[in-house]
Image: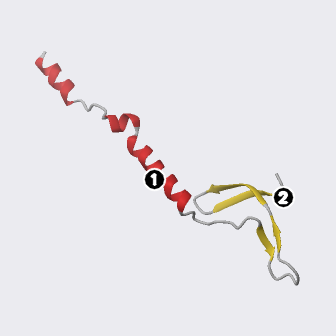
Amino acid sequence: MARLHRARLRQRRPLIGEKFDLLGQIETVVADYFASKYPIYEFEDPYPILTDAPLIPVKIPLRNLAATVTSKEMIITGDVGQP
């Protein structure tokens, strides 16, 4: 009986931090905060496409921007024009 009790005490019990993934949640909150304050790249909206035009610069509106990250590149997709 005492052996069984000692064996149960030696078993690793999950900690609250591991059970609820507190470290992962804290990392996500901190990353979201810094991403909103300091973006990796920020597009001008409307986006200039002809800046050397003789009269006025030509710009297009960008909508629904999304980024997909792979192991080799970051692909940014979006819609051009009014929503």
- Residue ID for mark 2: 81
If the image is split into quadrants, where does the N terminus sit? top left
Q: How many marks?
A: 2
User: What residue would you read off at disc 1?
Assistant: 30
Looking at the picture, which amino acid does disc 2 mark? Gly
Mark 2 neighbour density, 10 Å: few (under 14) some (14–19) many (20 or more): few
Q: Secondary structure at mark 1?
A: helix
| Image position of 71 (left or right of 3) | right
- Location of residue 52 by image quarter: bottom right
Give, as a three-letter code, the residue at label 1: Val
Q: Reply above or below: 73 against 4.
A: below
Q: Position of residue 39 (x, y in %)?
A: 57, 63
Name the outermost residue toward the right: 55
Residue name at image x 19 percent, y 30 percent:
10
Q: Give the mark nearer the N terminus: 2 vs 1.
A: 1
Instruction: Give the colour scheme shown.
Output: secondary structure
Mark 1 surroundings within 10 Å by alpha-carbon count, few (fewer than 14), some (14 through 19), many (20 or more): few
Find the distance from the CA under tag 2 to the CA under tag 1.
Answer: 33 Å
Whether residue 23 is situated above or below residue 55 in the rendered picture: above
Residue beneath the point at 73% across and 57% down: 77
* Side of 47 relative to 17 (left or right): right
Name the spot of residue 51 as percent of width and height, x first: 80, 79
Q: Hey, which residue is sitting farthest left in the picture? A: 2
What's the mark number on residue 16?
none
The answer to whether residue 58 is above or below residue 62 is: below
Residue 11: horizontal and vertical position, in percent?
A: 24, 29
Q: Position of residue 32 (x, y in %)?
A: 52, 52
Nearer-the-camera pick, 44 or 70? 44
Q: Which residue lies most toward the front here?
A: 56
